């Protein structure tokens, strides 16, 4: 353990600090990954995480120890992003996501590459770029589910939407991402694809 | 359970986010229907691929240090 500070804080502050480190700061990687996908750049992502963690620490009394700290932190981070960062970091969405009905990739590849080995040839940066290009509501649902592993209920809480909306966004978001990665793979010659 | 319904619920099945009844129906359909079974395998590969490719990045050490300083060095 670290050596004691020069002037020891009162025991309750000490306890708050150790609980916060143990239950909240362990989720820093998750918070940063989500922040990076929300803001689109490292500087804003770092500022967003720092501010969100600071707010969480100030509001720590509202958190019930042992419950879902990551969901609670991600909710703070996302609300902060919506209120403070979104307007200046990204243009408002101009597409109506309800009209997006992406096609299924599997029928396109089932004869040529049913095990989808073409995915292996796509580098990480390209996957992240495709994720970043999804409409915002799809990106955050896919991110929280497929990258951070939150349950539908947890995602519904963070995004403040019904579980049915989470299902629908995940379905369309995943398919859209899949179709874009497939189109990229075709453009790079990783897979021939259907010639239409 | 027909193929269309099965494919519609495939992600919920893979995410283990459905009622036990529906899960049984999907499992039975997948066992009987090779095309849906193959699509299930493809979607499972895709989700695994996504997670593997997007979790490599963590918070920079410098950010961690700054946060600890700001929180506790007051």
Image: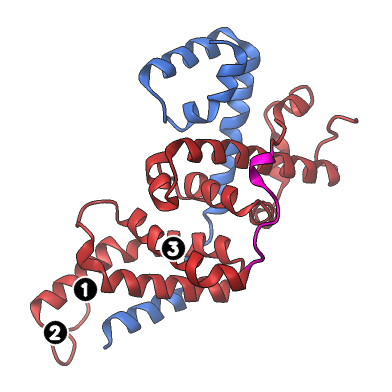
Looking at the rendered structure, whether the residues under marks 1 and 3 are on a common chain is answered as yes
**Colour in which the image shows chain B:** blue
Q: Mark 1 and mark 2 in contact? Answer it, CB < 8 Å.
A: yes
Q: Evaluate whether residue B61 shows in this view.
A: yes
Q: Compared with residue A52, is residue B72 higher up or lower down, i.e. above or below?
A: below
SS for dot 3: helix
Note whether A90 is above or below A135 in the view shown.
below
Q: Chain of mark 2?
A: A
Mark 1 or mark 3: which is in front?
3
- Between discs 1 and 3, the one toward the N terminus: 1
Circle 3 packing at 10 Å, graded few (<14), some (14-19), many (20+), is: some
Position of residue A59 measured from the top left corner of the image (x, y, whole percent): 26, 69
Q: Which chain is red?
A: A
* Label 1 to label 3: alpha-carbon separation: 24 Å
Find the distance from the CA under tag 3 to the CA under tag 2: 31 Å
Per the picture, the main secondary structure of the magenta-coloured stretch is loop
Closer to us: mark 3 or mark 2?
Answer: 3
Q: Which residues are magenta?
A: A90-100
Residue bearing mark 3: A79
- Are discs 1 and 2 located on one and the same chain? yes
| Labels 1 and 2: the sequence-earlier one | 2
Q: Which residue is mark 2?
A: A9
Q: Is residue B53 visible?
A: no
From the viewer's perspective, tell me whether residue A51 is left or right of residue A100. left
User: For the residue carrying disc 1, how many other residues have a C-alpha within 10 Å: few (<14), some (14-19), or many (20+)?
Assistant: some
Mark 1, residue position: A17
* Residue A125, disc: none
Of labels 3 and 2, earlier in sequence is 2
Q: Is residue A113 magenta?
A: no
**Residue occupying image coordinates x 56% and y 67%:** A86
């Amino acid at each position: 353990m670290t050596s004691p500070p020069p002037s020891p804080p009162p025991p309750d502050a000490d306890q708050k600090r150790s609980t916060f480190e143990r239950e909240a700061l362990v989720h820093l990687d998750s918070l940063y990954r989500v922040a990076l996908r929300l803001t689109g750049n490292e500087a804003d992502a770092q500022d967003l995480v720092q501010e969100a963690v600071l707010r969480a620490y100030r509001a720590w009394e509202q958190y019930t120890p042992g419950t879902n700290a990551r969901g609670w932190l991600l909710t703070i981070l996302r609300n902060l992003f919506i209120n403070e960062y979104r307007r200046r970091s990204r243009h408002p969405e101009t597409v109506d996501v309800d009209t997006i009905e992406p096609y299924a990739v599997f029928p396109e590849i089932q004869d040529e590459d049913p095990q989808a080995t073409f995915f292996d040839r796509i580098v990480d940066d390209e996957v992240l770029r495709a994720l970043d290009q999804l409409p915002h509501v799809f990106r955050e649902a896919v991110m929280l589910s497929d990258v951070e592993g939150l349950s539908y209920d947890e995602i519904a809480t963070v995004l403040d939407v019904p579980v049915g909306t989470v299902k629908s966004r995940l379905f369309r978001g995943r398919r859209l991402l899949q179709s874009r990665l497939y189109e990229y793979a075709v453009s790079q010659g990783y897979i021939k694809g259907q010639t239409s | 359970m027909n193929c269309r319904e099965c494919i519609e619920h495939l992600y919920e099945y893979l995410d283990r986010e459905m009622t036990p009844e529906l899960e049984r129906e999907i499992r039975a359909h997948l066992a009987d229907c090779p095309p849906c079974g193959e699509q299930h395998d493809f979607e499972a590969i895709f989700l695994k691929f996504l997670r593997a490719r997007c979790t490599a990045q963590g918070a920079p050490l410098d950010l961690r240090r700054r946060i600890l300083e700001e929180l506790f060095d007051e």
